[in-house]
Amino acid sequence: MMAYNGRDEATTRKELIDHQLRLAGWDVANPSMVEIELGLKYGAAASDGIRDRSKESEFLDYALLDSTAIPLAVVEAKREGRDALAGKRQAEDYAQGIQQVHKRTPFIFLTNGHEIWFYEWGYAPPRKVSGFFNRNDLERLRFQRENRTVISNQVPKRSIVDRPYQIEAVKRVAEGLE
């Protein structure tokens, strides 16, 4: 008896993932919001890194774009019945290609239509979420990531902490939080 593996990837995308993206405010039919099957080029031949369909080496399932058409997030889709995390390495490669071109690291979503994982590549491990984030949420997260302060570099106020062991304790806590 064969195991049921669910829908193939194209059907999973059309019937499940497109619907979930729409629920989060992403208009999958609007190329200024969502680029579907975005062609990515790699290496020295990539002058702009994207959109030259004559020379691409791989296709990104979805790119969720900010208001200036820069990818905020990549969505790596797997067919229903496959582990959503199976595309993690592939999505990292896509994110790296986008980062090289735009000097901004996109967020990553990994999904099989039933599970959605959010991955802040380079900052935090993947975590399961209940749905895709909308454009405003992703732009806010990107702003926070790009403008975060390294707390271990901060010097405690001497009016609050003035003893050497207190200063050392604050440094250790800051290092632990990072």
Image (tube, grey):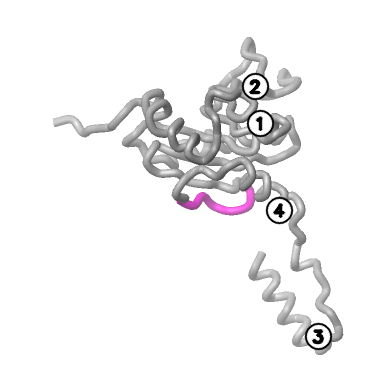
For label 1, the residue is 97
Distance Cα–Cα, label 2 vs label 1? 8 Å
Disc 4 crowd rating (10 Å Cα; few below 14, some 14-19, many 20+) is few
* Pointer 3 residue: 160
**Quadrant in which the N terminus appears:** top left
**Badge nearest the viewer, 4 or 2:** 4
Disc 2 to disc 1: CB gap under 8 Å: yes
Q: From mark 2 to mark 3, how far is it between C-alphas?
A: 53 Å
Q: Which residues are magenta?
A: 122-128
The answer for how far apart the CA atoms under marks 3 and 4 are is 27 Å
The numbered mark at residue 167 is none
Amino acid type at image mark 2: Lys
Residue 143 shown left or right of residue 8 in the figure:
right
Q: Is residue 51 left or right of residue 112?
A: right
Name which of mark 2 and mark 1 comes first in the sequence. Answer: 2
Residue type at numbered disc 4: Gln
Residue type at mark 3 is: Ile
Q: Would residue 13 be visible to someone looking at this image?
A: yes
Residue at 39% across, 33% down: 16
Callout 4: helix, strand or loop?
helix
Q: Residue 144 shows which numbered tag?
A: 4
Comparing 28 with 109, the one in front is 28
- Residue that appears at 40% across and 44% down: 115
Which amino acid type is marked by label 1?
Gly
* Mark toward the viewer: 1 or 3: 3
Secondary structure found at label 2: loop
Q: Circle 2 sits on which residue?
A: 41
